Image: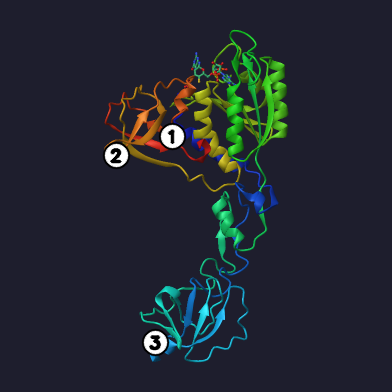
Amino acid sequence: MLLTFEQAKKALLEAASLNHKPLTEKVTLLAALDRVTAEPVISPINVPSFNNSAMDGYAVRLSDINQSKLLPLATTIFAGDDISNLNWPIGTCLRIMTGAPVPDEAEAVVMQEQTESTATGIKFPYEIKSGSNIRYIGEDSKQGSVVVDKGTRLTIATLSNLATLGIAELTVFSKLKVAIFSTGDELSDIGNPLTNNSAIYDSNRFTLKLLLTQLNCQIIDLGIIADDPNLIKQSLDTASKLADLVITSGGVSVGDADYTKTALAELGEINFWKIAIKPGKPFAFGKIGDALFCGLPGNPVSTLVTFYQLVQPLIVALSGQNSSNDTMSFKVKTATSLKKSVGRLDFQRGRLQINSDGELEVVSTGQQGSHLTKSFNHANCFIVLEQDRGNVAQGELVTVELFNSLLK
Ligand SMILES: Nc1nc2c(c(=O)[nH]1)N[C@H]1C(S)=C(S)[C@@H](COP(=O)(O)OP(=O)(O)OC[C@H]3O[C@@H](n4cnc5c(N)ncnc54)[C@H](O)[C@@H]3O)O[C@H]1N2
Ligand code: MOO
C-alpha cells in the first residue's frame, strides 16, 4: 500500500514536533542572518523615539497660519539638535531639516517647495493639513511591543528593522546538526577521476551539502562509505551520536547491495515507505538513538525532490521555525503536453514564462526521468500533477509551485 504525499509529510512533521530540542544561544545581530528567533523580540525603545520632520521645510502652528500667511523666521533646527530650551515666539515659524526634532507645539511641517522666502519672512500660499510631514514617536515600533515573533527566520530586511531599535544581540535556536554520507562502491568524489567504467560521481552528497547550507544547518560530512555492512552500520551509529538528523541517499529500494536497509533495521526504528509520488517513491524515515533519520532514494532527481518536498519542511520544523510559508502555488495553462501515468503525484520540473501575448504559461523542461538532472537546469517551478491524473494536453490548466528560496 502506497502512502500519500500528505500522509508522509504529516508523519514527518509529527516527528519534528516530538523531537524539536530547543537549545538556544545568543548571537550578535550581524551573525543572526537566517537564524530562527527563540523568543519574541520586544522593542526596547519607541521608533521614532521623538517626533521629527519628514522634510526640509518650516514647522508651524496652525493658529499662527490662520492669523497670517506670512510668518517671520524664529530659528533653525537641525537633526541631532536638543530643543529642550527652544524659544519659539507666537506668530513665527521655524526652519527645520529632515530628521530634526519637531517641537510639541508644531502642528505641521510645510515642505520648502510649497513656501516662498521673502525679506520679511516665509510665505505659506497653500492649504496646510494638521500633522503633515511630522513623523510621530512610536509610529514604526512602540516601546514594549512585539516586533518579531518567536520562530521567525531572520532576513536582511527584518534585521535591518531590528537595527533601528538598537538591538545588538538576539536569542536564537542553535543550528540543527545534520550528518550526511553516501553509500555505494560506484561513487567517486567530485574532483577525482572516475575509478572505473561503471563509476559515477557522488553528486547527491554535494547537493545535500548545498541544500543544508542554504537551510543554515551545521553539516557533519562523513563522506562516501563503501558497500560494507559493518562500515555502514558504524557510520550510522557515529552519525546518530553526533547529529540531530541523519540523511543518506541511496540504498532504500530493493537492490541486493542495499546494506543500508539491513544496518538500519538493526540499529533503529526505521520505516521503509513507498510514497505515491514521482520521483521519490522509496523513502526511509525513523529514529536511530536520539537522532531522526531520512533515507532518500539514490537517483539524483529523486534525492533533490524528496529533500525539497519532505525533508525541507522537517528541517524547518526541527529548527524551531513556525512555518516555511514562502511556497506559492497557483494554476496556469501548460504550453507543452505532459506525460503522466495515473497512480502517483508528480513533481515535474517546469519553467513559468510570459508568452508573446503577455500571458503567464508553464513549459516542461523536457524528459523527466529521475536520473536526468538536466530537467532542473532551467526550471523555476514544479508542475504538480494530481495522483489520479493521466497525460496532460497542451492548454490544460495545471498547478505550479514556484521554487522557494531553497532552490534559488
Ligand atoms: N525492483 C525495484 N527497483 C527499483 C524500485 C522499485 O520499486 N523496485 N524503485 C526505483 C526507484 S523509484 C528509485 S528512485 C530507486 C531508488 O533506489 P535506492 O534508493 O535503493 O538507490 P540506489 O539503488 O543505491 O541508487 C539508485 C541510483 O542512484 C544512483 N546514486 C546512488 N547514490 C548516489 C549518489 N550519492 N550520487 C549520485 N547518484 C547516486 C545510483 O548509482 C543508481 O543509479 O530504485 C529504483 N529501483
Ligand atoms: O524515486 Mo524514483 O524516482 O520514483 O525513480
Tell me the element at label 3.
Answer: loop
Of badges 1 and 3, nearer the viewer stands 3
* Residue 308 horizontal/vertical position (percent): 51, 33
Label of residue 69 in the image: 3
**Left or right: 392 with respect to 379?**
left
| Residue type highlighted by circle 3 | Lys
In contact (CB < 8 Å): disc 1 and disc 3: no
Q: Which coloring applies here?
A: rainbow
Q: Which residue is mark 2?
A: 359
| Residue type highlighted by circle 1 | Asn
Q: Which numbered disc, 1 or 3, marks the residue that appears first in the sequence?
A: 3
Q: Residue at x 49, y 73 (%)?
A: 56
Q: Residue at x 29, y 39 (%)?
A: 359
Q: Residue at x 62, y 16 (%)?
A: 187
Which of the 4 quarters of the picture holds residue 236? Answer: top right
**Separation of residues labelled 2 and 3 (CA atoms):** 55 Å
Which of the 4 quarters of the picture holds residue 17? Answer: top right
Of residues 84 and 266, the one nearer the viewer is: 84
Q: Which residue is mark 1?
A: 380
* Residue 241 horizontal/vertical position (percent): 72, 32
**Which of the four quarters of the rendered structure image does ligand 1 lie in?**
top right
**Separation of residues labelled 1 and 2 (CA atoms):** 17 Å
Viewer can see residue 312: yes
Tell me if the residue at label 1 has its CB under 8 Å from ligand 2: no
Badge 3 crowding class, 10 Å Cα cut-off, few under 14, some 14 to 19, many 20 or more, is: some
Label of residue 136 in the image: none
Q: Residue at x 54, y 82 (%)?
A: 103
